[in-house]
Amino acid sequence: MSNTTGFTPLLTQSRVDGDSLVFNVSEDWTQGRTAFGGLQAAMALTAMRKLVPAHIPLRVLQVTFIGPVLVGDVTVQARVLRTGKSVTHAEARLISGGETGCLVVGVFGSERESSLKVDNTVYPELPSAESLKNMPLFPGITPRFLEHCALRWARGTPPFSGASEAHTGIYIRLDEPVSSEAHMVALCDIIPTPALSMLKRPAPASSLTWTLELLRNDYNETSAEPGWWLMDAEVTRGEGGYLSQTALLWDAQRRPVALSRQTVTVFA
C-alpha cells in the first residue's frame, strides 16, 4: 500500500481550530466520493473524547450520514449535550465543503450495580479464519478504504454473486491492532451490506443511519499483529431501495463485542 495514511496517524495528526478539530482525509480512506463511514464516526468520537473523560466507556453511537464528506480537510465540531450521574450525551458534526456531512450522538455511561445479567447471543459455528482466503480487491469496484482491511467470507458470498439470501458471516481485521474505541468503531463498519451478495452485477449502496452499541470495553488487542473478528450480519427487511440490517461482532475469544444496526440505501 503506497502513498497511504494509517488509521492512527490520520486521527492523531488532527489540528485544533478554535473549538473544532480538523482532520485531513486522504483518498485511500474513501468509499465512492465520500470518506469511509467508520472513519467518519471515528473522527466524531475523537472530537467528543476531548470533552468526555476517558474513564467513562462509550456505550452507543448514533450516526446519520447526511451528505458526502470529501477528501481533504474535514472540520469536526463537538459539544456535550448533557452530563448526568452516570451518563453523558455528546454530539459531533462533520463539516465538509461548508456543509454538514455527518451528525453523530455519542452516549457514554459509567457502569452501575445491577442484579440483571442477560445474554441470549449464540456464537455461529463457522469455518476458521485461517482456513479461508482474503477477498480480492478490484480497483474501481471495491472501495479504496478496503486497502486498510481484510475480509474473509465464512458464510454467504461476496457482493454481486447472486446469493439466495442476505446473510453473511465475515472475518474482518484492520491493518493495525484494535487498541481504542475509535478502532472498534471503524472495524464495525467494514463489511458491505449482505444484500449486495444477492445482486448479480455491481450497484452502489450507502449507509443512511447507523446505531452501534458496544457490549464490552475490554476489547483491546494485546498482540502486535491485528487479529480476526467475526461479523455476523443479516438484512431483516428490504424494499423500495431501503434495507434494515443487524450485525453482531465477535472477538477471538467468541465473546459478543458490538451490536450494529443500519438503514442502508441501495440503487438496484
Image (spheres, rainbow, N blue to C red):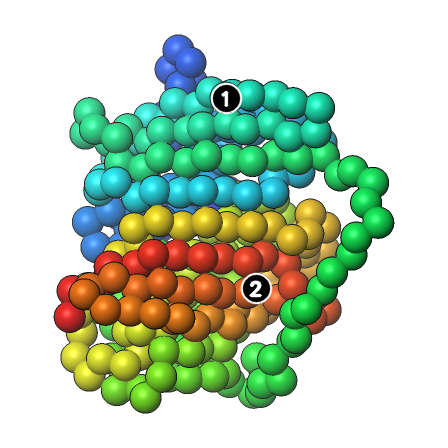
Mark number displayed over residue 95: none
Seen at 33% across and 26% down, the residue is 75
SS at circle 1:
strand
Seen at 31% across and 73% down, the residue is 195
Q: Quadrant of the C terminus?
A: bottom left
SS at circle 2:
strand
Residue 145 x/y as whole percent: 34, 56
Residue 61 x/y as whole percent: 49, 42
- Circle 2 residues within 10 Å: few <14, some 14–19, many ≥20: many
Q: Amino acid at mark 1?
A: Leu
Seen at 81% across and 45% down, the residue is 114
C-alpha separation, residue under disc 2 versus residue under disc 1: 29 Å
Residue 5 x/y as whole percent: 39, 46
- Circle 1 residues within 10 Å: few <14, some 14–19, many ≥20: few
Q: Amino acid at mark 2?
A: Leu
Circle 2 residue: 249
Instruction: Name the side, left or right, on which 254 lies relative to 181.
Output: right
Residue 188 x/y as whole percent: 49, 57
- Whether residue 138 is visible, yes or no, is yes
- Whether residue 29 is visible, yes or no, is no
Residue 118 position (above or below residue 51) = below
